[in-house]
Image (spheres, rainbow, N blue to C red):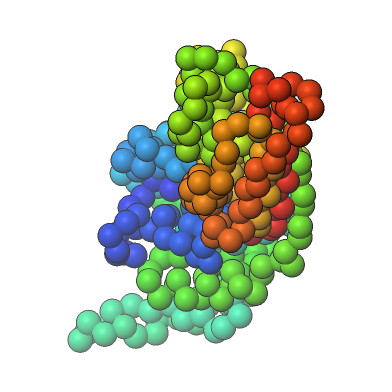
Amino acid sequence: MTAIIAAGGRGTRFGGAEPKQLVSIGGRTILERSVNAFLTHSSIDDLVVALPRELAEKPPAYLTEAPKPLRIVVGGARRQDSVAAAFAAVPDRSDIVVVHDAARPFASADLIARTIAAAAESGAALAALAVRDTVKQAVRGKDAAWVVDATLDRETIFLAQTPQAFQRSILRDALALTDPATDESSLAEKAGHTVRIVSGEASNIKITTQEDVSMAEAIGRSSKPARTGRAGTGYDLHRLVAGRRLVLAGVTIPFERGLDGYSDADVVCHAVTDAVLGAAGAGDIGRHFPNTDPQWKGASSLDLLGRAVAIVRAQGLEVGNVDATVIAEQPKLAPYIDTMRANLARVLGVSIDRVSVKGKTNEGVGELGRGEAIAVHAIALLRSL
């Protein structure tokens, strides 16, 4: 099952210097929140995200390091063009396709599940809110002012939302039409298909103008779950060899030997990366950045750590704090500790007081005590966003 996130527009009604989907709500962008709702949903196998060209060419890390398969396509001039471009990238195996507007960052897991279930049963479905107020249909009067033409039966009026879900063949029929439409369910109707209504959610607002941001902030605060703690541990060891730089937590330390490894062999970052990934149940550094992949040869381990942080953020988690113990006989690390902490804090997205790095010796015992290697133990605490 595939989710399409329609984020190809530039939000001209919203205004502002950056695309609407990159506006932050409670510390996370609108786009990240919308994408994360589907990345974390058990029914969704993969995603296709339609973006403006400039954003598609340089996407944020939470898209490039997603925990599920995620494809990025360039959106079109109209919403239906963007969805059509995304639909072309949907895997053949997907029998149900869900379309969601990136400007709706608060769709709940239950709403997504109910919409998918209705589409599986009926062919097409959309989330929609029943109208509570009396509905008036208006026309222009002689002086160009709006005047009431009719009072409509509000029992039959619904306000369309997304997600909208379709059996693959029905969405294909809908997107084959060239008629202008504001959503895919309208096209499905025109193609002759019945679209079932699923009860929507008042909190599933669409952010269209600047005035909507304050409401979104309030919803974000009220819907925020209790922060849960998840701990993970990491361990790594690299041998010291001649002819290599010694890099620890992104700091190049003057020494006659460096650590042997496929990347820059930054043993501190490797241990912290494993701790972060482990706390999220997201595997380890070897799974995501294997030493069989040429793109990681000589890579900055701080960059790898940043990618790991993006992976856990896509799961709705952020780093709370990190503690690392470096075991090395030489060199002495005290002059570099604060810079190491600052580098880690920047990449982890936390203040420096939430990062601890300690240097210990192995009292001359074993290969560490003989100065043949450096090892690091790390622990990371994650919490829900």
At a point 33% along the width and 78% down the height, the residue shown is 139
At a point 62% along the width and 27% down the height, the residue shown is 288
Closer-to-camera residue (204/329): 329
Percent across and percent down for residue 159 are 55, 67
Horizontal relation, residue 274 to residue 22: left or right: right
Residue 87, compared with residue 33, is above or below; it is: above
Placement of the N terminus among the 4 image quadrants? top right
Most distant residue in the right direction:
365
Closer-to-camera residue (33/2): 33
Closer-to-camera residue (324/102): 324
Placement of the C terminus among the 4 image quadrants? bottom right
Percent across and percent down for residue 242 are 52, 14
Residue 318 appearing in the image? no
Residue 199, compared with residue 55, is above or below; it is: below
Rendered image quadrant of residue 282: top right
Most distant residue in the front direction:
364
